[in-house]
Image (cartoon, grey):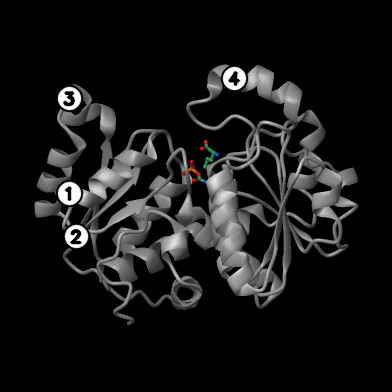
Amino acid sequence: MATKLKGRDLLCLKDFSKEEILEIISFGDKLKMDSMVGKQEHYLEGKSVAMIFQKASTRTRVSFEVAAFELGAHALYLNANDMQLHRGETISDTAHVLSRYVAGIVARVFAHQDLVDLAANSDSPIINALSDLSHPCQILGDLMTIREKKGPLKGLRLAYVGDGNNVANSLLLGAARVGMNIAIASPKGFEPREDIVKTATEIAKQSDSSVLVTNDPLVSVQDVDVVYTDVWASMGQEAEHEERVKVMRPFSLTADLMGHAKNDAIVLHCLPAHRGEEITDEVMDGPQSVVFDQAENRLHIQKAVLALLLG
Ligand code: CP
Ligand code: NVA
């Protein structure tokens, strides 16, 4: 097993090289194949992993918990509201204490800065399970899925249509690192963060690929291999839902819009989906959709992340 990844925090994909990202994905592929033949190596025998969640989760929580179990480790689900954090204990004190107990901390937070503070004060690796800024574990699984369906990632074309949110930010960085060409179409005022677009553009230059941010969904999906979307109001933005639906309606992933992508293009969505908003039933349940294979791969990739970083 590689040693470069051992002990590292996973906060943002920009901190990982193309080789490291591909190593995680390839290890995910191996673990997936192992599990298909009933093989289960206990890379984390006897270790414990803390999982702090400030927000709801189905896939991330369950995939990490099952991953830890299948690797021989014990996962502790910690709802942040039930912790002393909720009564004012600081993030840094929490990190100091937890890292004396566990081999790694998986955390889903509102403010990305909480992850940075956890990492600065923990001797055990911190793994970003989604923040307001990014969702790197999701994108690692997505790259695994895209490679599984489409072959080598370099040179593939991907469009993300909708809100320029945490998932879009990580997709920009991940795609640029592995040399995919990425186009993001968001309404004015809902584009991904400028600093992320700038970083992704610089990374893309090194990878000989491209980054495009546009306000025109048709431009983004033209002849692409992969079309990706996500909810229009992320967790914590529920109050803006109605207003966002009005602005984002033209960015809905419909069969019409899919008609502009390649005929064999695949459809990804990190889920949960708001059917009838960012994606129609027809597209989500249609032959080009791979959203449930994508969700399954969260398990295999989470195993790879845990084994490589904490093993
Ligand atoms: N895609 C994803 O992270 O889903 P959950 O919010 O259910 O974890
Ligand atoms: N952008 C969504 C992703 C959920 C997995 C959110 O943050 O709610």
- Answer above or below: position of 153 versus 159: below
Whether tag 4 and tag 1 are in contact, CB under 8 A, the answer is no
Q: Residue at x 78, y 57 (%)?
A: 288
Q: Earlier in the sequence, mark 4 or mark 1?
A: 1
Q: Secondary structure at mark 2?
A: loop
Cα–Cα gap, marks 4 and 3: 28 Å
Q: Earlier in the sequence, mark 4 or mark 2?
A: 2
Q: Which mark is residue 121?
A: 1
- The answer to whether residue 71 of the structure is visible from this angle is no
Q: Residue at x 24, y 62 (%)?
A: 73
The quarter of the displayed image where residue 206 is located:
bottom right
Q: Position of residue 193 (x, y in %)?
A: 57, 42
Q: Position of residue 49 (x, y in %)?
A: 23, 54
Cα–Cα gap, marks 2 and 3: 24 Å
Q: Which mark is residue 240?
A: 4
Q: Which mark is residue 88?
A: 3
Cα–Cα gap, marks 4 and 2: 38 Å
- Left of 34 or right of it: where is 206? right
